[in-house]
Amino acid sequence: MVWINAENFATAKAAGLLAGPITPLLPNLNRYYDLNAADLNYDAGIPIDGYEAIWGRAQLVISYDAAVVPNPPRTYAELLAWAKANPGKFTYPRLPDDFVGSAFVRNAFYELTGQSDLFQGDLSAAEFEELAQPVVAYFKELNPYLWNQGQSFPASQEQLDALFKNGEVDMTIGFEVGKTAGLVAAQVYPETVKTYVFDSGTIGNAHYLGIPFNAPNPAGALLVIDFLQSPEAQIEKMKPAVWGDMPAVAVAQLSPPQQASLRAVEAESGALSLQELTAKRRPEMKAVYLEWIKNLWVEQIAGQ
């Protein structure tokens, strides 16, 4: 069994490395999930065709300490102004290595270009680079006001979290929507640490499970995947102390006791509600653009 999505799924599927279709063989998927949902049929624009099974959803969120930043920036434009007024107190993980850093940069495309649907369609490399110019200009302007003056970046989300915990930066970024609440509950972060999303929204995506074509026990892998898609497992991993991951089940298809359990976790976590997140969820881009953005960052933004 493998955890897979986006570019890795595109590569594995094209090379015939995944067993399938597997989704018709998963009872919990066919009972508790909205089979018409976009992310049950496409992964970063790639037709799933039953070769991977959704495991969870995620959305880019920003964590901050309200005692230090009582009014956090609500847009990329406000973030630039805030960074200029607070030099060295913000950064993001470097590209091309870190998925969170890449997501933070590509999320800017929606606000700074004023476009959304274009990035789910087909653009030529030249068209994409033309659209990217205001984004490139923005991050070049932001660079000198970042931590370490933008001359180096955290290698990972974990390193960014450590900078935040130590007070070197005033915000951190991640996809685990309940993780920050779990760290507050564990007293790793102070009670004043909260999460939010930009007014223009943030990218949401999904992660999946697949089975390699040469798996020695595919039947066993199917049983595990089916369990991980069960309402009980989905609600358990939603708990901040466990993972803080967004469930992928269709809430309306759960029994009343299951819905009550989900709402109880949601209420206790202190994190953003699923309703708030869904209202500001932006679509993931096609997989090819993720690679183009990494290249643009390395060639035109890093160290500039």
Image (spheres, rainbow, N blue to C red):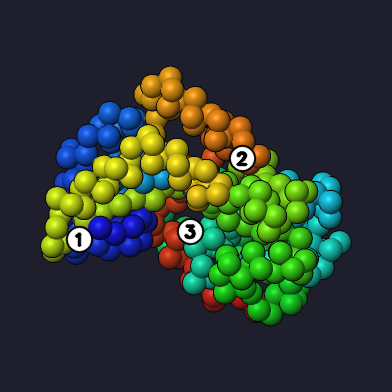
Q: Indicate the amino acid at tag 2.
A: Ser
Name of the residue lying farthest toward the top: 256
The secondary structure type at the circle numbered 3 is helix
Horizontal and vertical percent for residue 13? 22, 58
Mark 1 or mark 2: whose residue is earlier in sequence: 1
> 186 above or below 228?
below
Q: Tell me the residue that label 1 is attached to.
A: 212
Horizontal and vertical percent for residue 121? 40, 47
Quadrant, the C terminus: bottom right
Q: Which dot marks residue 41? A: none
Residue at coordinates 33% horizontally, 32% vertically from top-left? 33
> 21 above or below 24?
below
Q: Which dot marks residue 128? A: 3
Q: Tell me the residue that label 2 is attached to.
A: 269
The secondary structure type at the circle numbered 1 is loop
The secondary structure type at the circle numbered 2 is helix
Q: CA distance from mark 3 to mark 2?
A: 39 Å
The quarter holding residue 218 reads: bottom left
